[in-house]
Amino acid sequence: MKRSATAVWNGTGKEGKGHLSTQSSVLKETQYSFSSRFEEGVGTNPEELIAAAHAGCFTMKLSFNLSAAGFTPGKLETKCVITLEGGVVTDSELDLQAEVDGISDEKFAELVSDAEKNCPISKLLDTKISVTYKLN
């Protein structure tokens, strides 16, 4: 399986503007700029997209882990915060709210740890990854 995205940039790094498009068309000429990346401008940025990818990948891997262990996941909601400092992504912090009936805290922690280490985006990222969670 291969997936693709395209970035188009016009102008200098600070004054220029660009857009991103994905193969699926979920992003179609979605604006990004210096302002949307380093300030509070309108548009997306690479770090926000990495956060979405990591949250989505981790959450889906955890769902597979729970199902394989004989549990039926209810709602799994993960927020990911990517930290960019000095031009380097330094952290990916995953914060999970989970509803899973009948699972022990120990078993849940084991399955969360496996998802943290083994989702494809975690394996891709060369940064510190942390997970906090609340099991309801």
Image (cartoon, helix red, strand yellow):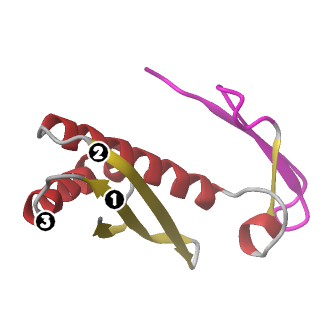
- Looking at the image, residue 77 sits to the left or right of residue 118; the answer is right
Q: Residue at x 69, y 58 (%)?
A: 45
**Residue at 78% in and 65% down:** 36
Residue 17 x/y as whole percent: 88, 54
> Magenta span covers which residues?
1-28
Q: Quadrant of residue 104?
A: bottom left
Q: CA distance from mark 3 to mark 2?
A: 14 Å
Q: Which residue is mark 3?
A: 105
Q: Answer whether labels 3 and 2 touch (C-beta < 8 Å).
A: no
Which mark identifies residue 73? 2
Q: Are marks 2 and 1 in contact (CB under 8 Å)?
A: yes
Residue 121, can we see it? no
- Going from N to C along the chain, the mark reached first, 3 or 2, is 2
In the rendered image, residue 85 lying in the magenta stretch gets the answer no
Asked if residue 133 lies left or right of residue 35, the reply is left
Give the residue drawn at x 44%, y 52%: 54
Mark 3 element type: helix
The reply, left or right, for residue 101 in relation to residue 8 is left
Q: Is residue 108 visible to the viewer in this orientation of the structure?
A: yes
Task: Give the total number of marks visible in the rendering.
Answer: 3
130 relative to 98, above or below: below
Q: Residues within 10 Å of mark 1 (few under 14, many from 20)?
A: some
Mark 3 or mark 1: name the one nearer the start of the chain: 1
Q: Secondary structure at mark 2?
A: strand
Q: 28 and 12: which one is in front?
A: 28
From the top left corner, tell me how far across and down residue 7 is, in percent. Answer: 73, 41
Q: Amino acid at mark 3?
A: Asp
Q: Looking at this view, is 92 or 131 the one in front? A: 131
Q: Position of residue 20 (x, y in %)?
A: 75, 42
Amino acid, disc 1: Ala
- Give the camera-side residue of 75 and 23: 75
Tag shown at residue 98: 1
